[in-house]
Image (cartoon, rainbow, N blue to C red):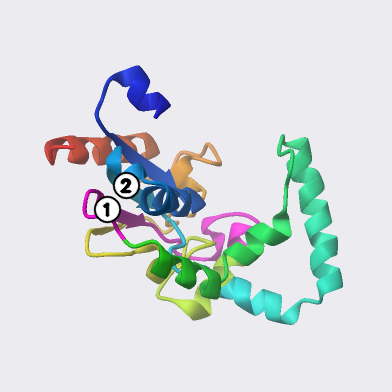
């Protein structure tokens, strides 16, 4: 609403990465934001969760999970999160929870949806923890970005699989330039410019 007020536009186009895509779908479906959103483009979003998280939670003891969660929560507090909950965030990413959420968040006919995905081409496409995530995700799909599988991210009929021809591939972090790394054959700034251009050319 603030963006609409400042810009004078009737609606906005949302481009959302990772869980931001789930948050945006919730706002559109549950909070009436479809009146103000023209399109939603999700980038590497776990629409159907991360099955490796289900696997980990089924094997890790509650004590170990809470120990790890406390360490991450302290880190997130240092980074500025006033109410971190690593465990809650982890459980929200299970296949069961995200699949249930998908049923609860039907697409609005007022909004144009598009889902975009990339994938790593091997273990050394990214550093820790995405390289570990790549291994944990391998049994659950045709490829993954170190966190999300292709099958979880490509939702609906309007999809885009980024075909990176280099040996490296593109990780979950690469799509937001997390590592500030130049990647042969992929310019992250140009990628988003092209997304916006396609929206404009399509009348959005």
The residue where tag 2 is placed is: 40
* Rendered location of residue 203, percent (x, y): 13, 37
Give the answer, above or below, for where 12 lies relative to 46: above
Q: Are marks 2 and 1 in contact (CB under 8 Å)?
A: yes
User: Quick check: 55 left or right of 10?
Assistant: right
Q: Secondary structure at mark 2?
A: strand
* Rendered location of residue 13, percent (x, y): 30, 38
Classed neighbour count for the residue bearing mark 2: other residues with Cα under 10 Å, few (<14), some (14–19), many (≥20): many
Q: Is residue 118 magenta?
A: yes
As rendered, which of 41 and 142 lies closer to the eye?
41
The residue where tag 1 is placed is: 113
Between discs 2 and 1, the one toward the N terminus: 2
* Rendered location of residue 41, percent (x, y): 32, 48
| Residue plotted at (51% across, 80% down) | 139
Q: Quadrant of residue 92?
A: bottom right
Question: CA gap, disc 2 to disc 1?
Answer: 5 Å
Judge whether residue 164 can be spotted in this image.
Answer: no
Q: Secondary structure at mark 1?
A: strand
Label annotation for residue 99: none
- Magenta span covers which residues? 107-131
| Residue plotted at (32% across, 47% down) | 40
Classed neighbour count for the residue bearing mark 1: other residues with Cα under 10 Å, few (<14), some (14–19), many (≥20): many
| Residue plotted at (40% across, 75% down) | 142
Q: Is residue 98 magenta?
A: no
* Rendered location of residue 192, percent (x, y): 33, 38
């Amino acid at each position: 609403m603030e963006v609409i007020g400042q810009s004078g536009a009737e609606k906005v186009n949302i481009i959302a990465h990772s869980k931001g895509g789930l948050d945006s779908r919730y706002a559109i479906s549950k909070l009436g934001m479809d009146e103000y959103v023209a399109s939603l483009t999700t980038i590497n979003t776990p629409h159907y969760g991360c099955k490796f998280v289900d696997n980990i939670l089924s094997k890790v003891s509650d004590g170990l999970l809470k120990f790890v969660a406390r360490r991450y929560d302290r880190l997130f507090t240092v980074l500025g999160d006033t109410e971190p909950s690593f465990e809650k965030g982890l459980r929200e990413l299970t296949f069961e929870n995200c699949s249930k959420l998908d049923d609860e968040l039907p697409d609005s006919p007022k909004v144009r949806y598009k889902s975009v995905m990339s994938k790593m081409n091997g273990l050394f496409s990214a550093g820790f923890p995405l390289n570990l995530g790549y291994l944990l995700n391998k049994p659950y799909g045709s490829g993954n970005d170190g966190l999300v599988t292709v099958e979880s991210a490509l939702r609906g009929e309007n999809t885009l699989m980024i075909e990176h021809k280099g040996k490296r591939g593109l990780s979950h972090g690469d799509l937001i330039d997390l590592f500030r790394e130049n990647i042969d054959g992929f310019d992250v700034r140009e990628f988003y410019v092209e997304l916006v251009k396609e929206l404009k050319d399509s009348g959005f």
